[in-house]
Each structure stands twice: as structure tokens, then as C-alpha cells.
Image (cartoon, rainbow, N blue to C red):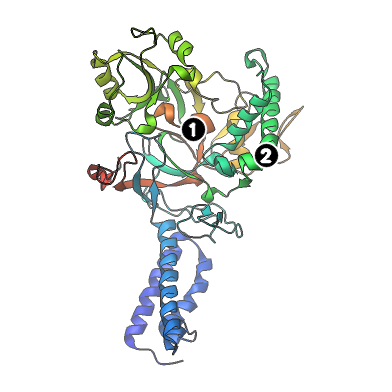
Amino acid sequence: MRKATRAQWIKCSIAIILYLIFLIWVKSWWGLIIVPFIFDVYISKKIPWAFWKKSKNPAVRSVMSWVDAIVFALVAVYFVNIYVFQNYQIPSSSLEKSLLVGDFLYVSKMSYGPRVPNTPLSMPLAQHTLPILNTKSYIEWPQWKYKRVPGFGKVKLNDIVVFNFPAGDTVAQNYQQTDFYSLAYDEGKRIYSNPVNMDSLTREQQKVVYDLYYNAGRKQILSNPANYGKVVWRPVDRRENYVKRCVGLPGHTLQIVEGQVMIDGKAIENPKNLQFNYFVQTTGPEIPQEMFRELGVSLDDQYLMTAEGGYEQGLMEMGLDSRNAQGGLNPVYHLPLTKEMYNTLLANKKLISKIIMEPEDYAGQMYPQNLYTKWNRNNYGPIWIPAKGATITLTPDNLPIYERCIVAYEGNKLEQKADGIYINGVKTDKYTFQMDYYWMMGDNRHNSADSRYWGFVPEDHVVGKPIVVWLSLDKDRGWFDGKIRWNRLFKIVK
């Protein structure tokens, strides 16, 4: 072995000590196999790591220098993305106006503790699909079990949280932002053109009808890949990233009463920019774009209900019956509004005639779909949020609520037989949860596909906490017309 200098020994010692601290933090002793390679890089130099530097061919040296830099950058990005922070772009309006479409965020993995990846062999910066190639960005083997290393804290009430979409385990690739189970259920209902009235059915009969719809819809999706795309399964850490606000913690009993979230019977503080959908009818003229800009309503959220769309009868039934001199309905807009936006419009008597909240028949089926509860997005629950170590008694009324937690998230086999419930082959009416769960909702309450539609967020799905908006782009404007929202740059996410 060649004689190393004092400086090389110091550098080697520092590198090994830092690496061992990292291994202690992540509690992964398999990483010790890397220590001899670190020693070789600094001291023994048996492996010719930089062999290309001795090449007499300048093209080889040039190309390999780029390869070396790219490999180093990819490895660095891989570890930074997993254990420190990740870039995330807001794709939808579910958290407007707290976070805007086009906001780019730094998401801290340290806030709740980074997860050791389920799929360690993956391409950095690609969540599940490689661009252009349109293939998986990860190798499914090996699959590591869930483990979270220590962080700065835990999820708190009203935190904005980035997490993997819980219902995104099964995905129809042409409907990647849609819950596959809801999609299958809805497709099944379309196949049976006369949906059954659930009010008249027993719990057992309701489950039979649900299974009938779901299985018919699932068969339809699987047999039509040209329309729906290939159906794939994804590991937890390769599911779509969602961002919502945590409004319910493990062990809480949550209820929504007239749009107000209640925790253990008490109203929680609402976000400042809480939004609901409304129908806004004018006195005749259309709302000018200047007013929409002042209000902060994006082009995507400006929907004019035209007479040609067949909306007239429904609008009149809601009381939106103001007409012009020619007898036609005055313009009606479908808009998401905060309380401040609502008051601003209502005060404009010259332009605005009526404002009515969107009725419940505009919402879809609530979670769980296989339990007919009559819950809706404004009046939901009460529902208990599972906590790690807590034991519940399973009943026909609550089994559909917790079945997915027991089977899909905690990996048990559950069977319902004539004589009772069997979990992993053992008859029981009790279950003890192995993880904490959370209830996530968007601030744009009527435009948010959240826990009301697909249920609980398990702790192993939690990615991190948005810390700062480092860039914000308004897709409704050009580069010389305010596309960059300068007032949002480096804005702290509260």
C-alpha cells in the first residue's frame, strides 16, 4: 500500500466519521460495506477511480469528465431528495389561495423525518415515469419496508403537508390524477344506467350493489387499455405527490358541519383563504377580466354557464332567474370564492344580482364508497382517525371505513364470512392499528379531491412539509405581463 500523506489521512477520517454519523441517523448498518471504498479513495487507491484522466485521447478525457460530473451530481441529488429537501410544483387549485397553481416549493424532508425509500433503485428527479421514454423510473426490486428516521417534529394540526396519494397504488395511466377505485365505481354505475336507491337497502345489500358496480367498472377499465391506459401498481414512495392541509390528527374524531371542520366536538381555526364554490349571476353585463384579476380568479376557475350548455332549468331551480330585456337569463358564473371575494362581489350591486353556494349534488360519492352514509362534503362524519396502538371493535358500520387501512396500508388479509370477520385466518372483531393516520383537506373546499373522497393518509405516505415558495409563475400571463409573481418569491409557507 502506497504511503498516504497526513492531509489524506485527515480527509479520510473526516469522510468516514461523517458517513458513520449518517448511518447511525438512518439506522442502516448495511452501509458499512461502503467504508472500505471510502478508505480506498483517500488512502490505498487500489481501484483506479479516475483512470480516464491518464488517457492520451482528449475526447475520452472530455467525455469521461462530463460523465464523472453527471454521476456525482445524480448521486448528490438522490441523497438530497431523499433525506433533506425536494422540489415540488403546485399542479392544482386545491389549496388556493394559500398556495397557488404555479408555485414552486422547497419541501423539507427533515420536518417530519425522512423516509428510507421503499424503492432504493430509482432515477433522481423522476417520481414514477421517465420523460420521453415513458417507462418506469424505478426498479421494483429490492422493496424495503417502511422506516422513518428522526426529524424535527411530527405533523401538527393545520400543517400543509406533501404526501403520496394513498389511493394511487393502482392507476389507470390515462387517468393518473384520478382515484382508480372511484373511477371503477363510477364507470360501473354508468354501465347500470338505472342506479339502485341505496336508502331502501340493508348494509349487506348495499355492499353487494357496490361490489357489482366496482367489479363491472374494473372489468371495463381493464378491457379497454386504449381508452383508460395500462393499469399499473405503484409502491408507496412512487405514487403521485399531493399537497393538502392536515385538519385531523391520529386519535381525533372529525366531523364537518355546514362546511366547518370540528375536532372532538370543537370547531378548528379555518384557513384565512378558505374557499367554496358559488354561482354568481350578474345584472346583465359579463364580469370584466380586470375584476377577475383583482379578485385573483384564474382563467381555469372562470366558468360562464351559457344557455347553450343546457344549464337554464337547473339555474332557475336555484333561484338564479334574473333575465335581460330579450327574456334570456343574465350571465351566471361558477366561481370559487373566499369570504373576502364573496363580500367584494356582493357589495357591487350594479354588477352582481345574486350569489348562491354550489349545491351538494355537484359533489361525487364520499369515502367510503362501499358504505352508504348520506355524508356530503359540507356535512361529513363523525369519523374517528386511527392512531398507532389503538384498538377498535369492528362492526358492519365501521368495517368499510377501516378496511383499507387494515388490508391495503397494513398488509393484512381480511375475510368476511357467514360467522364473522377473519384477519389473517383468525376470527376476531378487534383490530389494533400499526400506524398513525391523518385527515387531509384542501383550502379550496369544493375543488379539492381529498380525504372526504379517498380516506385516511397513513404515516408512511407522508413526504414532508413545504417551507418556502422559491418561484411562482402565473400561467394566465405572459413573461412581459406579470408571469412571475415577484411578491411570492421566497415567501414562507405558513
Asked if the residue under mark 2 is in contact with the one under mark 1, i.e. CB atoms within 8 Å, the reply is: no
Residue 80 placed where, x, y %?
Answer: 40, 60
Q: Which residue is mark 1?
A: 451
The residue shown at (73%, 40%) is: 425
Hey, which quadrant is residue 185 in on the image? top right
Identify residue type, mark 2.
Answer: Asn
Relative to 298, is 329 above or below? Answer: above
**Chain-order first, disc 1 or disc 2:** 2
Residue 398's disc number: none
Residue lying farthest to the bottom in this orientation: 2
Q: Pick the residue in front: 449 or 358.
A: 358
Q: Secondary structure at mark 1?
A: helix
Residue 297 placed where, x, y %?
Answer: 32, 30
Q: Secondary structure at mark 2?
A: loop
Relative to 240, is 119 above or below? Answer: below
Residue 235 placed where, x, y %?
Answer: 57, 50
Identify residue type, mark 1.
Answer: Ser
Q: Which residue is mark 2?
A: 224
The residue shown at (35%, 48%) is: 105
Hey, which quadrant is residue 428 in on the image? top right
Eye-nearest disc, 1 or 2:
2
Hey, which quadrant is residue 332 in on the image? top left
